[in-house]
Image (tube, rainbow, N blue to C red):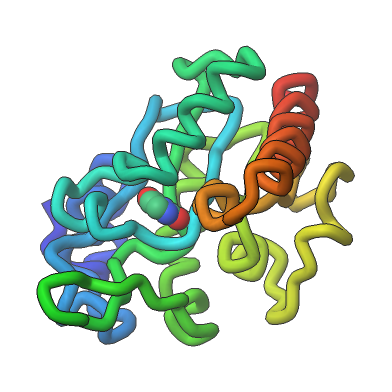
Amino acid sequence: KPESDEDIEEIQSLADARAAVQGCRRCPLYEHATQAVFGEGPERADVMFVGEQPGDQEDLQGRPFVGPAGQVLDDVIEKVGIDRRRVYVTNAVKHFKFTPRGKRRIHQRPGGGEIQACKFWLGLEIGFVRPKVIVALGATAAQSLIGKASITISKLRGEPIQMPDGIVLFVTNHPSYLLRIPDAEGKRRERAKFEADLVLVRETM
Ligand code: URA
């Protein structure tokens, strides 16, 4: 198994990429993270959800979307009737970026250079998994997939975007955005929009 991504020619499968990512030195984020968190799901999936980066829980467990944001995503996937067996979940950036504050680790948004460096791994996942539909959860994922630095979710959501290889991209909010809305009414409204976006995904995949 390749130890680092310098053995690019040895990456022939999703399993190879999953092993190689632990040796990634393409940006400095590996220095403080516990491990790289690769995507999860079937080797061929119809839909790929792309988040920003692993959070605290994901960094510790080595699995994407196992914390609070993942719970929201799971709930909505189930509610709109997307078949989990057809879903692959991953992140635009594979290492947790944070600043320590006491005993806590506070999430920091990855920068353009980190997003760019990590596109190598996301590209491999897309190439092997070959999804029909990709869902960018939030601006970081959209930035990675569209290649544009300033993304306005409200302008892009609700409309399919044609990508190379016949892939259809949908852009929507990150589920952790829903968790941060303080008032109940705003939360309800934004959750309804998120659900509507995922209904479109279900109808397209
Ligand atoms: N937020 C993300 O973007 N990805 C995860 O895996 C968890 C939280």
Q: Position of residue 146 (x, y in %)?
A: 71, 65
**Which of 61/8 is in front?**
61
Is residue 13 something one can see in this rendering? Answer: no
**Which of 195/96 is in front?**
195
Q: Position of residue 160 (x, y in %)?
A: 85, 43
Report the side of 69 relative to 192 (left or right): left
**Which of 140/23 is in front?**
140
In the image, residue 183 sits, relative to residue 155, either above or below, namely: above
Residue at horizontal 43 percent and vertical 45 percent from the top = 69
Residue at horizontal 72 percent and vertical 48 percent from the top = 186
Residue at horizontal 54 percent and vertical 17 percent from the top = 78
**Which of 27/152 is in front?**
152
The count of marks equals 0
Residue at horizontal 29 percent and vertical 67 percent from the top = 95
Q: Position of residue 59 (x, y in %)?
A: 21, 57
In the image, residue 125 sits, relative to residue 25, either above or below, namely: above
Q: Position of residue 117 (x, y in %)?
A: 43, 77
Is residue 77 something one can see in this rendering? Answer: yes
